[in-house]
Image (tube, rainbow, N blue to C red):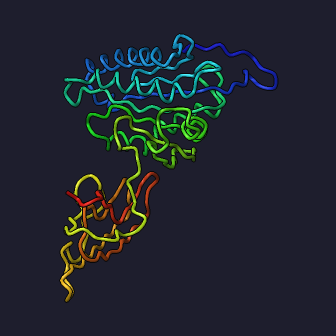
Amino acid sequence: MTANGTEGRGGPGAFRRRLLLAVDAQGYGRSDAVTQREFQAGLARLLDAAAGAAGLDRDRWETQEAGDSVFAVLPEGTDEPALVDTFMRALDAGLRAFNRNRVPHARLRLRAAVHFGPASPGPNGFVDRAPVEIGRILDSAPLRGALAAAPDDACLAVAVSASVFHDTVGAEYTTVPAEAFRQVRVEQKEYRGDAWIWVPGSRAGQPAPVPDRPAEEPRQVRPQPPTGPEYTGPEPTGPGPTGPEPAGGAPVTRIRVTADEVAGDATVIRADRLEGTVEGDAEVGRVAPGGTLIGLDLRSGGDGK
């Protein structure tokens, strides 16, 4: 670890509020020794290259490294939007190049977190609130789940704290739109707070669209039963999606879903177009932090051709 803290008045060490970066490799512990060595070397090269692309002097970072992970306190005056935007885009591009032609178990996929807060060097690492908070965000279930649920070609999932999101992304200092992030609740050990997740090059980090109202002119295609990664709960019970038709000929779709917990993004019905009436209800014990339960997801507009 590189550090240069000094004794400060009123406490052991100087008070500093800095920009923090934490990165961790997915599945490192399950990899063999050869792959772990490749991951370590690749991670160092990729961080160097991304820092160079963003105009960040990595030689001035105060870092703590542990094989598959890096924690860094960046110098005062570091360009925060450059770290969230240019650095992460370059890191994602580097990961995609690194993983090209590699078998799935040998692909390097990273979780990254960005935070801003008080951090000072201690006898065996950094101390104060911010290093603990960024560690909780990096290890949180929503961030791990976002990377796990992303397509195989997605290599990076980024989480930023509330202060970073509002001051950089929300204030439009980056080319990454706020809509590319998904707000989640992080409840990790003693930490409770909000974070925003972005998966570059993928919609995996974004919330599923929820229609404001039923379509005024329902399309002439029957809905399909809940299948695929959009639905993570139990199979629906009761009559199937092609229920009895009233005298007028239009079908009635009746769906009932019961679940103790929704831990991811669950969509009860997903269809391009609907015909007739949809009736349904759900009994869900709880929606876990970061989870989303959607009753209906209409995917297309226009004439559906």
In screen coordinates, is 137 left or right of 68? right
Figure quadrant of the C terminus: bottom left
Visible in this render: residue 26? yes
179 or 158: which is nearer to us?
179
Relative image position of residue 258 (x, y in whole percent): 33, 69
215 or 53: which is nearer to us?
215
Farthest right residue?
9
**Residue at the image position 66 percent from the left and 23 percent from the top:** 120
Farthest bottom residue?
247
283 or 128: which is nearer to us?
283
Visible in this render: residue 125? no
**Residue at the image position 40 percent from the left and 36 percent from the top:** 157
Q: Is residue 262 above or below residue 24?
A: below
Relative image position of residue 140 (x, y in whole percent): 46, 42
Q: How many marks?
A: 0
**Residue at the image position 52 percent from the left and 43 percent from the top:** 195
Relative image position of residue 134 (x, y in whole percent): 54, 34
Q: Is residue 70 above or below residue 169?
A: above
Relative image position of residue 85 (x, y in whole percent): 48, 29
Figure quadrant of the N terminus: top right
In screen coordinates, is 130 left or right of 242? right
Farthest front residue?
303
**Residue at the image position 64 percent from the left and 32 percent from the top:** 117
